[in-house]
Amino acid sequence: KTSLAMRLVPMSTASSLWPVAAASAPRRALVKVPATNGWKGHGRSIAPASLVCIGLSVLVQQNLAPLAYGWSGSGLAARPARLPLPLFELKSGQSQLRRMNSAATRTPCALCSTDAAASAAEELHSTPQNTANAAASNAMRAHTRPAKFVPFPFDYHEEIVVNIEGLTNRGHGIARVEIPSPTNGHSSAGDGSDEKTASPNDQETTKWVVMVPNVIPGERVRARIFRNFNSYSEADLIDVIEPSPDRTEPRCDLAGICGGCQLQHMSIQAQRDWKKRLVLEGLAQHGISEDEARASDCIGTDEVFGYRSKLTPHYQYPSKSRRGRKNVDVQTSEEAVVITAIGFQKSTARQIIDVPFCPIGTPEVNAEYARARDRLLNNPPPGKKKKGATLLFRQGELNDDHIETNHNEYLITSVGRLRFRYRAGNFFQNNYFVLPLMVQEVVRHATRDDVMTHLADCYCGSGLFALSASEHFDKVVGIEINDQAIEEATANAVSNNVTNCEFRAASAENIFEAIKDFPNDNTVVVLDPPRKGCSTDFLMQLYTFAPRRIVYMSCDPSTQARDAKGIIAAGYGITSTQPFDLFPQTRHIECLMVFERL
């Protein structure tokens, strides 16, 4: 345990080695490393409860932060002489323990026979240097591991060398490490080695998945474990031993720390190749082969930075001091609000990190963001918000200096020959350069063969796809459950002089009532659902209506693949799969799939 009142109490660790350094030591100090079965007492009277094999003396570099001022007594009477300094977290590579020669001091164990104690001490001293180093390092890892950490198959902050085989849908690297099978009686405490490799041993082994961020398939890396789950572990990237030729230097200093971008370390071509592969892997998980998918290469543009027209940074508010109290103005005794960070979530936690500039945002958006940051950091707004706030910076037209920060104000964005008006806080795609390409592909597939006379745009939003394709159809109906979006879409039809398009609000259960008179053999249904995909109720209505063609745009290939399996089972075949790199440097993918009734 760690006692704040006593400032330092060594933790209870069965059969572990505890490095202790003298606070006033010279550059190298002779210190004892006792192995104990726990501790008794507290404060200056703390002592080992029992000693398994007290005995190894080591040399400790001065840069090892002291845990105590040394030890007094021996055997069961051994105890820290003074305990004035707090514990510290031993970081890999910052200190080195060196084993003394075979003449190192040994103290027999008072609980064991002299022969047993001498045998144990002899075994301890006869181990190689790396074993002594590993034992001390493992003891410190046991001390610093979180309370709920599960130490199997790796200890907390244990370092391993792995080969990256692929990437998850979140952009994290996948490595597979051979570990001793849990059925062979291996404990979860580790084997005393600071570094494991992915090579098999003579015992029965099993494959264990380790996920590492900021890596590329084909790389060999060193990673540090921070969490074990039932079937895989998560680790931080420590070093790239064998880099991929696709590795590139990130433009952002916070790449790998900020959770906004996951792929800045990859070349743009590698990013797009991976996004296509991810779409195919998602379809394969639902039994749809690569030949059946008919996937094209991922479409993108040269604008891979400075493209995003909307940023939504966050801040925590108010901040608290380390003692848990709100900041208080000493002169007025009033609470003083302090904003310490404005930015985005950390890639490995929910903590907000300070992000002064976002390289994927447009220059105008970043300029307004910088001005707002100065105002907030120097003059925090009054109020008693407990969970912080989310800011909005949104640009309507490319190169427009006006940046909207009010969710309820309107913006106008041009896409092709049409202009769309929408509230700044509502959904509208944020990449000026790729969005027109997406619209062109939707219209091209919807109008193919000139046999379609009717179009239904489900999840129509502000009317982007319905209005863009309206000139090719006799009648177009946009359907949306959001009344506010229907108002915006209707107004956009009027302002763009579109007369054959109407928009209707309908619930998910009755969404096809609006088009029940459409001839299904000449009707194309366009889908652009939210990330969770289409609901079961909606899909059942879609199958019942049975349109000739389905054009399905998705922002989540995994839910799209799930829905594709059902659409195929309902009697459709895939005619095209087209990924879009709408958000370069990030893991996000837009994907268009086209289905034709068989």
Image: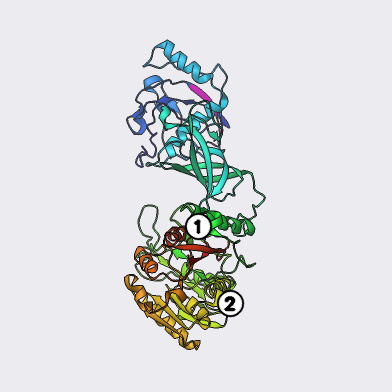
Q: Position of residue 181 (x, y in %)?
A: 45, 31
Q: Name the side, left or right, on which 387 lies relative to 292.
A: left
- Label ID, residue 212: none
For the residues labelled 1 and 2, the Cα–Cα distance comes to 26 Å
Structural crowding at the residue carrying mark 1, measured as other residues with C-alpha within 10 Å and reported as few (<14), some (14–19) or many (≥20): some
Q: Which residues are magenta?
A: 56-63
Q: Which residue is found at the position 59% from the left and 62% from the top?
A: 298
Query: Is 129 inside the magenta-drawn segment?
Result: no
Task: Kindly identify which residue carries mark 2.
Answer: 398
Crowding near the residue tagged with mark 2, few <14, some 14–19, many ≥20 C-alpha atoms within 10 Å = some
Q: Residue at x 44, y 75 (%)?
A: 457
Q: Is residue 98 above or below residue 528?
A: above
Task: Please name the predominant secondary structure of the magenta segment in the image.
Answer: strand
Q: Position of residue 491 (x, y in %)?
A: 44, 85
296 shown above or below 91 = below
Left or right of 181: which side holds 274? right
In the displayed orientation, state which residue is furthest to the right: 245
> What SS does tag 2 mark?
loop
> Can residue 460 be spotted in the picture?
no
Identify the residue under disc 1: 259
Quadrant of the image containing the N terminus: top left
Amino acid type, mark 2: Leu
Quick check: 281 above or below 476? above
Q: As shown in the figure, which amino acid type bears the numbered disc 1?
A: Gly
N-term-proximal mark, 1 vs 2: 1
At horizontal 46% and vertical 13% (from top left) the residue drawn is: 118
The one of 562 and 569 positioned closer to us in this rendering: 569
Q: Does residue 335 appear to the left or right of 577 in the view shown? A: left
**Label 1 element class:** loop
In the depicted view, which residue is nearer to us: 96 or 116?
Answer: 116
**Residue 445 placement (x, y as % from top left):** 54, 71
Q: Quadrant of residue 314?
A: bottom left
